[in-house]
Image (cartoon, rainbow, N blue to C red):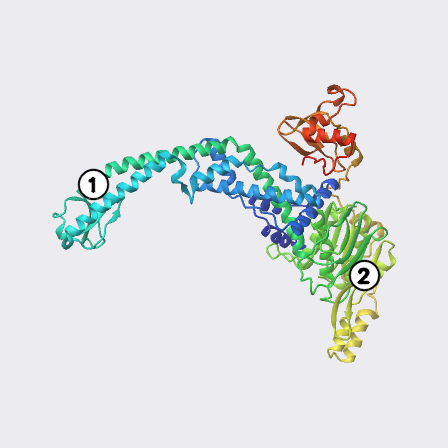
Amino acid sequence: MNIEKALEFDQIKELWTALALTERAKEKISQTVPFLSESELTVRQRETSEAKLLIEKGGNPPLVSLTGIREWIETGKKGDCLTPAQLEEIEKALVAVMRLKDYLRRCRQYEVSLAYYDENLDDLQEIKETIRQQIRNGRVDDGASKLLKSLRSDIDRLEDRMKEKADSVIRANKECMSDTFSTYRNGRLCIPVKKEYKFKINGSVIDKSATGNTLFIEPAAVAKYDEELQLLKIEAENEERRILYTLTVMVADQAEILEQNVKTIEKLDFIFSKGKLSLEYGGTEPRINTERRIVLKNGRHPLMDRKICVPLQFQIGGRVQGVVITGPNTGGKTVAIKTVALNCMMAQCGLHVACEEADICMNGNILCDIGDGQNLSENLSTFSAHITNVLDILKKVNPDSLVIMDELGSGTDPTEGMGIAVAILEELKKSGALFLVTTHYPEVKQYAEREENIVNARMTFDKESLQPLYRMVIGEAGESCALYIAGRLGMPENMLRIAAKAAYGTEIPSELAKAAYGTEIRSESAKAAEMAFEKETSPRIQKKKDTKKKQERAEKFKIGDSVMVYPDKKIGIVCQKADEKGVLRVQLADRKIWINHKRIKLNVAAEELYPEDYDFSILFDSVENRKLRHQMERKYVEKEEIRLEE
C-alpha cells in the first residue's frame, strides 16, 4: 500500500511544494522521507522552527526561483557566450542575493543560527554593477562602450539618410506608387510600386505583394548606402559580441561563488518552505523521543478546516501498546487514526505538527491498512486485498513500528472476521509495535478489555440528534449504535428484537463452525505456528549521540590559535571562543567571520605562537580602542565608550 497516499501525506507535499520557489527545493520536497537519525531530525525540526520565527518577525525572505542559472554558469565555464537576456537574469539573481543577505543580517537580532547563512552568500558587487550598466532591456546598452555608441549613432544617421532618399523617390513618382510610405522587405528598404510602373523606377525588385499587383523595389539612390550600412552593422555586432564575451568570462571566473550562492538559496528555499507550511496550518514543533511514546494535545488533521475540526486528545506508550477504537459509522474513527499517523510522519520528516502540544516517538516504519483496497486488475476482493495487505504488514512489523488498521477483520463473515481480528491483534502485540485499530466487533472490544497492554477507546455520539461528536475517549469501549439509530429512524420493535437476538443472543455451535470451516478446531500451538512470519529487514532508529563530546571539541579552540578555515583553506586566528552552539569567531586577512567549529582545523596552537599573558587586543582591537582602554585603566574618561567591531 502507498503509505503516503493512504495517510494523505502526498497532499501535504503538494501544499508544501507550492510554497517553494526553486526547482531543486521542490525536487527535495518530493523525495522527503522520515528521518531515522535522531540527531538529524532534531536539526531539521530546529530549522523549521527558526524559519517560522524569521517569517513571523521579519516577513517572507526575498527568495527567487533561479530558473536556468545553473545552466548559464555551465555555459560560461565551457567558453560559450551568454546572451544579454541570460546575463540580465544573472544580474537579477545577484540582486536577490544582496537582498537575501540584508534580510538575514537584519534577522540576526533574533539570535537563531539560520540567520548566519548570510556568510555563505556573496552578491559579487562588481559583476552585478557591470552587467547592470552594460545590459538593459535584454540588449547590450549603447553606453556599454564608446565604440558601440559611435557605431550605433552612425547606423541611425545612415538609416535616416536612406529613409529620406526613399521618401523623395515616392514624392517624385506619386502616380507610380501604391502607397505613400517606404517599408522594409527582407532587410532592405523598399518603396511600393505598382506593377505596371516597375520599369519607370530605377532600382532592384526585392519582393512583391500577395496579389502581385505591388512590387517592392529598393531604389538605386538607397542601395548605394546599403553596403556601408551592412559594414557598420557588422562592426557593431562584433563589438556587442566582444562585450558579451567579456561579461561571460567575468561570470565564469566567479562560477564557484555563483554556484555556492545557488546552493545556499536552494537550501534556504527548502527550509523556509517548511516554515511557511507550518504557518499555513498553525503548526508547532513537537518534542521527539525514542521511548515509544505518542502524546497529542488538541491534535488536528492538517488538511481539515481549523474552524470545524474537533481537537483530538491522544496518548499511547508505556504500558499501553495498542488502542482499539470503536464507535458509530461516520463517527470519526478513520480520521482519528489518520490524524495520529499523519502527524507522526510529518514530525519525523522535520515538519511541524498540527497540535497545540505533541510528544512523538520516532518510528522505524509506519504501516497502515486503510480503505477497502479492492484491486479489480488483480481480481482481488475487498477482503482478499485487505488480508494480503495485513500479511505484508505483519512481515514488516518490528518494535519500532507504528501500525494503523481501519475496520479490522471486515469484509467477510462476521464470526470469522472477528477471529481473524483477534489473531492479528495477538501478532501485533507480540511484535512490540505501537498500533491503533478500528473495529465494530464486540468480541474485539472484550479482547482489548482482557489484555494488559491494549485499551479500548470510543468515538462519542449524540443519541438525541443522531450526530457524531468526533471526540475520542480512551479507556472506554464504544458501540456501533446501529440498532439504536435504526429504532430512532422507525424500524419496528419486533424487527429490533429479532436483530438483537441474532446479534447478541447466541453463539455459533461447534458443529456449525466445523461445517463452516470444513475442519476440526485446531490446537493453540498449530495456530501459533501459522502466525509465525518470516520477518523482513526493516529500518531502525539511530539515537542521537552524546553532545558533550561535540561541546568539548568546540571548546578546544583558544583565542590566538592559528586555524585552517574550510572549504576555502584560508588561514585565520581565533579571536572569540565558541558559544553553546559551537560557533566561534575567526580573524581572516581582510575580515572577521562567525563559523562553526566543524569547519576549522587547528594549524598552530596559541601557546606556540605567543608568549604567556600576551595582549591579544594588539591583534584584534583597533588603535583607537586600545588607546581609550589604556586611558580608562588610569582614570575616568567622560562621554567615551569602547566600540566593539561587528
Tell me which amino acid carries mark 2. Ala
Give the structural element (helix, strand or loop) at label 2.
strand
Residue depicted at 32% across the width and 34% down the height: 235
Foreground of the two, 366 or 198 = 198
**Residue 223 numbered mark, or none:** 1
Decide if residue 232 is on the left or right side of residue 244.
Answer: left
Foreground of the two, 114 or 291 = 114
Tell me which amino acid carries mark 1. Ala
Residue 134 vs 571, above or below: the answer is: below
- Image quarter of residue 477: bottom right
Q: Report x, y in % for residue 84.
A: 43, 40
- Image quarter of residue 558: top right
- Image quarter of residue 564: top right
**Residue 457 numbered mark, or none:** 2
Tell me if I can see residue 356 in this picture: yes
- Report the number of numbered marks: 2
Give the structural element (helix, strand or loop) at label 1.
helix
Residue depicted at 80% across the width and 35% down the height: 548
Residue depicted at 36% across the width and 36% down the height: 148
Residue 243 vs 530, above or below: the answer is: above
Q: Report x, y in % for residue 154.
A: 29, 38
Residue 126 vs 334, above or below: the answer is: above
**Residue 263 numbered mark, or none:** none
Foreground of the two, 540 or 362 = 362
Decide if residue 545 is on the left or right side of residue 159.
Answer: right
- Pointer 1: residues within 10 angstroms few (<14), some, or many (20+)? some
Q: Report x, y in % for residue 392.
A: 71, 49
Q: Report x, y in % for residue 70.
A: 52, 38
Foreground of the two, 498 or 466 = 466
Distance in Å between CA atoms under marks 2 and 1: 95 Å
Q: Which corner quadrant holds the C terminus? A: top right
